[in-house]
């Protein structure tokens, strides 16, 4: 995966779907209960093919070849936990959208707003045009920095080194692997839920 969906002006080598180094900033098949384990793995499931003709992007087989691994412990405060779960849901939806790829993948569109949504949609459109997909394992270890009114911030070290693009034959695309990137992620309230609004590279230490 390449963090191509990081904010403009940030050097990127990955997206996972839009991955991680320490710092701040740039995917849901469902959320697992973060309290069940200190390491949670969510794996993508292939959408069904339409035998009646050429499949639309959302129907293209993606395979069970992507996952998001979560390190660390979830927060205890209910408000922080809501943000934490929304954040994990975002990356699961992001990676799933890029693994299909589908610029109109509804779970992703529901998990983000611009400018971050526009960045990832653009990446998905590029992947679709090139007949490429993003697969692999994205590792995150989020820390909720703040929750204030309708905004929240999460600090993370996105590790996309095991994410990469593949071509139509399933071969890895050269120079498409992600990095370990420090990010600071801004979330906003949309009704009764949290969505990711912006992902920016940060300067904290990811070890």
Image: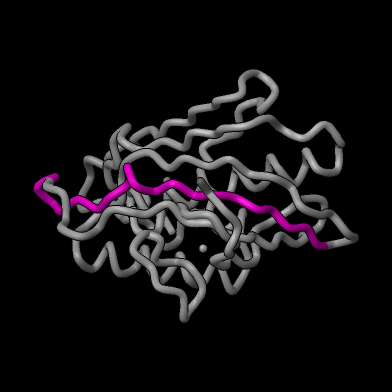
Coloured how? one colour
Identity of the residue drawn at 41% across and 55% down: 17
Identity of the residue drawn at 55% across and 25% down: 39
Q: Is residue 162 left or right of residue 198?
A: left
Residues in magenta?
151-170
Identity of the residue drawn at 50% across and 46% down: 207
Q: Determine the residue located farthest toward the top in the rendered image.
A: 36
The spot of residue 150 in percent (x, y) is 85, 62
**Residue 148's image quarter?**
bottom right
Q: Is residue 8 left or right of residue 73?
A: left
**Residue 34's image quarter?**
top right
Q: Nearer the viewer, residue 66 or 184?
A: 184
Secondary structure predominantly adopted by residues drawn in magenta: strand
Q: Is residue 75 above or below residue 143?
A: above
Identity of the residue drawn at 70% across and 42% down: 84
Q: Nearer the viewer, residue 88 or 109?
A: 88
**Residue 52's image quarter?**
top left
């Amino acid at each position: 995966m390449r963090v191509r969906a990081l904010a403009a002006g940030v050097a990127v080598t990955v997206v996972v779907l839009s991955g991680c180094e320490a710092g701040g900033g740039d995917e849901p098949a469902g959320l697992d209960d973060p309290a069940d384990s200190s390491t949670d793995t969510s794996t993508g499931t292939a959408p069904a093919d339409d035998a009646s003709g050429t499949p639309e992007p959302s129907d293209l087989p993606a395979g069970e070849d992507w996952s998001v691994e979560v390190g660390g412990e979830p927060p205890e405060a209910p408000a922080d936990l809501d943000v934490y779960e929304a954040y994990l849901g975002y990356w699961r939806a992001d990676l799933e959208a890029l693994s299909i790829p589908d610029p109109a993948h509804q779970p992703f569109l529901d998990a983000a707003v611009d400018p971050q949504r526009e960045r990832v949609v653009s990446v998905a459109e590029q992947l679709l045009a090139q007949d490429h997909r993003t697969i692999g394992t994205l590792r995150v270890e989020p820390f909720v920095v703040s929750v204030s009114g309708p905004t929240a911030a999460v600090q993370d070290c996105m590790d996309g080194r095991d994410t990469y693009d593949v071509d139509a034959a399933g071969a890895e695309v050269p120079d498409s692997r992600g990095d370990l990137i420090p990010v600071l992620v801004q979330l906003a309230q949309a009704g009764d839920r949290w969505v990711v609004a912006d992902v920016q590279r940060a300067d904290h230490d990811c070890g």
